[in-house]
Amino acid sequence: MAHIDKDTVLNSLYSGGVLPLFYHDDAAVAIEVLKASYRAGLRVFEFTNRGGSALATFEQLVAYAHEHLPDMAMGIGTIYDDESANKFIYAGADFVVTPALNPAVGTACAAAEVPWLPGVMTVTEIYNARQAGAEVVKLFPGEVLGSGFLKAVRGPMADLKIMVTGGVKPTRESFAEWFGAGAYCVGMGSHLFPKDVLARQDYDWVERKIAECLGFVKELRA
């Protein structure tokens, strides 16, 4: 299956500054969330591999995106091994996000020419991830490590591209903290998709919240 160009994916991650992280068993719900994210201005979306029907649901999301949202890069998250990575890449994943550093996943992504964003939380892991081919690393859990860690590590690694996941809130203050420390982008889940909002199918709320966050990014980078 054709994939969105690697540089385009990385540029979209940076330009929007926000990567939504979402999982739902119901493909219809997931499609509505995907549409709301697109309407808000996002061109990257991570579906997390957290349920037995994840692959089947992801295939439906990719099919919908290819038909109706042609420039939406579809990523898969919560991938631990190369076998899983290859399954989702074959299903259309434009990028792969992992909670931990497994170079075998990086090798699979390199072979398919799709970006790999491995989870890291130490300087050694960051170094090893970059050596294994990661152009962007995922700082996780962000709320444990803190923005001070990000700012400090970018001293000796000024060109480091870090996506912060965990601990990022949909407020200007939180965005100012992380982007002020040098975040390349931030990953956000439940704050963008609260259970009560999904229960009442208020997808306009999701669109407004994401658009607000994108506004914070533009303001802070101006």
Image (spheres, rainbow, N blue to C red):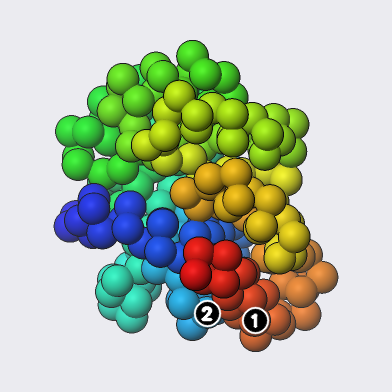
Name the spot of residue 186 as percent of width and height, x first: 56, 52
Name the spot of residue 88 as percent of width and height, x first: 35, 44
Residue 106, can we see it? no
Name the spot of residue 68 as percent of width and height, x first: 33, 80
Q: Cα distance, mark 1 to mark 2?
A: 7 Å
Q: Residue at x 31, y 21 (%)?
A: 132
User: In the orientation shown, which residue stands out farthest toward the right?
Assistant: 196
Closer to us: 124 or 202? 124
User: In the orientation shown, which residue stands out farthest toward the top?
Assistant: 124
Looking at the image, is mark 1 or mark 2 earlier in the sequence? Answer: 2
Q: Secondary structure beneath disc 2?
A: helix
Q: Secondary structure beneath disc 1?
A: helix
Q: Is residue 171 left or right of residue 63?
A: right
According to the picture, the residue beneath numbered tag 1 turns out to be 208
Q: Is residue 81 left or right of residue 218?
A: left
Residue 134, can we see it? yes
Callout 2 amino acid: Ala
Q: Residue at x 42, y 28 (%)?
A: 157
Q: Is residue 96 above or below residue 46?
A: above
Mark linked to residue 40: 2
Q: Is residue 154 above or below residue 103?
A: below
Q: Is residue 84 above or below residue 48?
A: above
Q: Residue at x 71, y 65 (%)?
A: 172
Q: Is residue 221 left or right of residue 145?
A: left
Circles 1, 2 touching at the beta carbon (< 8 Å): yes
Mark 1 neighbour class, 10 Å CA radius: few under 14, some 14 to 19, many 20 or more: some
Can you tell which quarter of the image residue 108 is in? top left
Closer to us: 155 or 204? 155
